[in-house]
Amino acid sequence: MNVTEENVEQVTGVLKEITDNSTALQPADIIEVSSGLEGIVGLNSTNENVTKAVINTIDNVLEAVENTEDLPVETIASLLASLEHQIATASRDGQNLTERTDNFALETKSINTKSLKSDVVLVVNDAETTTCLDKGCVKESDRSIRLPKKILQNESQTNLSFIVYFNDVLFPSKMVKETKTSTSDVILAATIYNTLPPHTMMSETMVELVFDIPEGLTAGNSTCVFWNETISEWSDFGCKKMIEETNKNHITCECSHLTSFSVLMLPTKIGTKKSKKALDAISTIGCWLSICCFTITIITLLSSKKLRNRLPQKIMINLCVALLCLDLVFVLGIDNHQTGNTSCIAMAALLHYFLLVSISWTLLEAISMYFLIIKIFNAPGSKFWWTAASLAWGTPLILVVALSVSFTDFYTSKDHCYIDASMTNFFIIFVIAPIAVIIGCNFIIFVMVIRKLFFHVPISGKIATKSRNTKRKRTANAISISLLLGLTWMFGFLQFEYLGLGLKGIEIVFVFLFVLLNSFQGVAVFILFCALQTECRHVWRSWFTVVTRCISNIPPQRDHGSITVSGSRTGTDTAAVNDISLTAIPSTSKSVI
């Protein structure tokens, strides 16, 4: 039947009657109904009977859609568009309409904004929805959406509408289905009909939304989102979650545009809580052990002139200092915060800085190996290494300072003093990309080094054999530490494939490996570069000897100019020990940093 302005009320009434028996509706019937509704709302009829019939028809259809899995997404999108279109028609006509069905409630208002003295708030209770112009009408237990009066005063008379959806049937999100997340118990929508387009970004004012936290879920696992009709998916662009320490039962969101809003939440199960506690314990224990181990490693290398003057140890000292600072800032500052304040932003910026510095020094480690093994006769001089060291410490500093000044929100995470990973583009460009590029470069250099060491034609003679053994020991140590750092981030990258899935299945393995390997980096460095190295053990013996003599008040014994060290062979100077498994350059090489 063709729908015209003359018969639109009759056709709409018939359509409503057909859909009253929702259990009998099949997918093909729903598709036909959605097509008919498109024709009806396209007439822009301001007849209140037509509006009510459209609302009831869509409500009937939703009862059937809820039990239908093979309905095209386009059909559901058409139903949502028809509902919004008809409500917009009624609202632009200045109608004050209030309707409540099993699936949604709506209200349209025409407000004289000249006399408006407060924000406009839609309060959502279990029994009713009400619009009020008084801030005090919103109780703590209410869900609400607040429109700032500033965006309502563009014209003397403003028409607006509110819709509260009691389920997400009209919002078939592929992401929600795949990640097994859930939406908030209501979806809130608001539209202003004046010269400001309905979905225009508002840079100076924010729309405030308050949602309940359903039982069994937590605010920490939630994200404020809006429905992007272009891609038929939830998006967090322009929305942020506000942290309210005094209100544990609600989530407050602020968004810079108008559309349909919700909160996506991950299920919080017993296993998840146990996993989180285990991860927190691993992080805390591992970081403090690493701090101790980094400290011992740095002191050991610095206390021996022979060790600290070598290029590999200089690189290792710088790497250890960067990682030590990273761990200290992490354990002391990441949870000691009020999100958004200066100290919290500073902690997040320092974490970003020392992370980039640490990765930069692994690249310098790889470069030193390249010139040691591949380009033996073209090794750069001290000027190159001084420049490289300056870049490793200076370039991240310039980047972090620039971000801190220009994009402060990047260092304002919702729950911690940390980088805001929800700013996806910034996070990829300034965190993921640099790490991925450097690890990729390290891997290429390591492949070249291994090929050179193990697949080239050997040089005959004891000198060549000794030289190869020395290089292989050095390469083994460098590859160990570089792969250790690289692999931790490889497991971190794998987590991105499972963002939003919660700690279950394969992703929990990647999470635990990432946390475990990162937290205990200092222990690995200590074992590889101190405990297993003869020269470092000689340094410790000398410390032990000095401490023992101080305690015993025994002067050092001298025998023909040689030093006797607590059970070591007389006449042997520890500085002369020729175990260079820790070094990449013979002991006669010049200091280059």
Image (cartoon, rainbow, N blue to C red):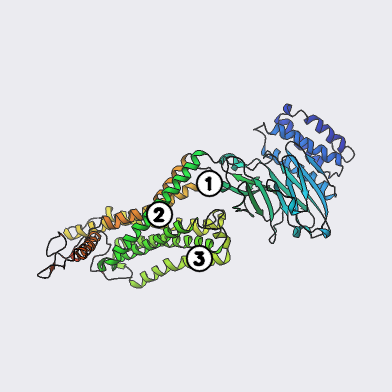
Q: Quick one: label 2, few (<14), some, or many (20+) residues within 10 Å? A: many
Give whichever of discs 2 and 3 has the lower sequence position: 2
Could you tell me which secondary element the residue under label 2 belongs to?
Answer: helix
Separation of residues labelled 2 and 3 (CA atoms): 26 Å
Going by the image, does 238 lie left or right of 446? right
- Residue 479 horizontal side relative to residue 466, left or right: right
Question: Which image quadrant: the C terminus?
Answer: bottom left
Q: Residues within 10 Å of mark 3 (few under 14, many from 20)?
A: some
The residue at which mark 2 appears reads as: 287
Q: Quadrant of residue 11?
A: top right
Q: What residue did someone put label 1 on?
A: 499
Q: Which mark is residue 399?
A: 3
Q: Is residue 91 above or below residue 306?
A: above
Q: Position of residue 416 (x, y in %)?
A: 53, 55
Asked whether the residues under the numbered discs 1 and 3 touch, taking CB atoms below 8 Å apart as contact, a structural biologist would say no
Give the mark toward the camera: 1 or 2.
Answer: 2
Q: Amino acid at mark 1?
A: Leu
Q: Position of residue 229 (x, y in %)?
A: 68, 47
Label 1, residues with CA under 10 Å away: few <14, some 14-19, many ≥20:
few
The quarter holding residue 543 reads bottom left
Q: CA distance from mark 1 to mark 3?
A: 27 Å
Instruction: Give, as a three-letter code, the residue at label 2.
Output: Cys
SS label for mark 1: loop
Instruction: Name the foreground residue: 89 vs 287.
Output: 287
Dot placed on the residue nearer the N-terminal end, 1 or 3: 3
Work out whether residue 266 can be spotted. yes
Q: Judge from the rendering whether residue 299 lies leftward or rightward of residue 141; answer left or right.
A: left
| CA distance for labels 1 and 2 | 24 Å
